[in-house]
Image (cartoon, grey):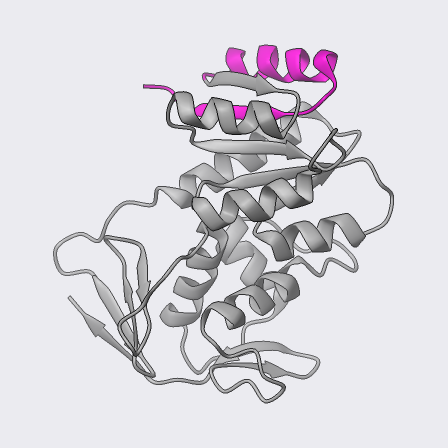
Amino acid sequence: MNDHLLIVDDDPELRQLLADYLGRNGFRVSGAADGRGLWAALEQGSVDMVILDVMLPGDDGLVLCRNLRARSPVPIIMLTARGDDTDRIVGLEMGADDYLPKPFNPRELLARINSILRRARSAPAEPGETRRFHFAGWTLDVDARQLVAPDGVLVPLGSSEYRLLRVFLEHPQRVLNRDQLLDLTQGREAAPFDRSIDVQVSRLRRRLRDDSREAALIKTVRNEGYLLAAHVSRER
């Protein structure tokens, strides 16, 4: 069955334009004008991705993104019409997987949708491949896409957090710069002044209870990038 996209935007013309374009490219598309419509659509059936505008009546897109991420790992792309980076950074902090400023080319949105969905459903480990990573008392189960804390608590991960953590685990004790991290997690290069990886690292640190000033697991290497300092063992 084709992937199901939910577009949440209070502009009916834009919703229809995107629905027509994405529908021609093989997706099932539903639309909602606000948060109430978002929750109603999610109750009616499974959704593979939410495309969420920041400026909405009632609860804005940032509030909805935070609440949705607390309930579900479904990938989220934020749309923002504002010229500064504030909404983009806050959206990433709230759990969005990517953002796209308006106006945008629908082809770019399509490319980002395909990239995120491809990574979100990366195939389970094949026989002989790593099925679990163990590090500093933590365990990442690749098949279940679950992170288990040292105390046994299951820690929810959004799709972008999962991809970023897996990249670090596959390259332990090695400095990765922002361009490398963006390429390995999203398949794109960093734009000038793009701080999205910094925001995602900050989110991942919070998941790992590693967000103190002296982070012990994911270290910042000044002017170079980030490094996972823990020893990593693999279970096949």
In the depicted view, which residue is nearer to us: 14 or 37? 37
Percent coordinates x, y for residue 210 in the rendering: 51, 79
Between 76 and 187, the residue placed more toward the observer is 76
Give the image quarter of residue 9: top right
Location of residue 41 with respect to 97 vertically, above or below: above
Residue 214 lies, with reference to residue 59, above or below; the image says below
Instruction: Name the residue furthest right.
Output: 83
Residue 58 position, x and y percent, is 72, 32
Residue at 40% x, 78% y is: 172
25 in magenta? yes
Q: Is residue 219 visible?
A: yes
Q: Is residue 10 left or right of residue 125?
A: right
Number of callouts: 0
In the rendered structure, the answer to whether residue 54 lies left or right of residue 82 reads: left
From the top left corner, tell me how far across and down residue 80 is, in percent. Answer: 76, 38
| Quarter of the image that includes the C terminus | bottom left
For image coordinates 44% across by 70% down, the residue present is 168
Identify the image quadrant of residue 45.
Answer: top left
Range drawn in magenta: 1-26
Which quadrant is the N terminus positioned in?
A: top left
Q: Is residue 161 magenta?
A: no
Residue 222 coordinates in the image, percent (x, y): 68, 84
User: Is residue 130 at all visible to an observer of this figure?
Assistant: no
Q: Is residue 45 above or below residue 52?
A: above
- Asked if residue 134 is positioned above or below residue 71 in the image, the reply reads below
* Residue at 50 percent of width and 39 percent of height: 115
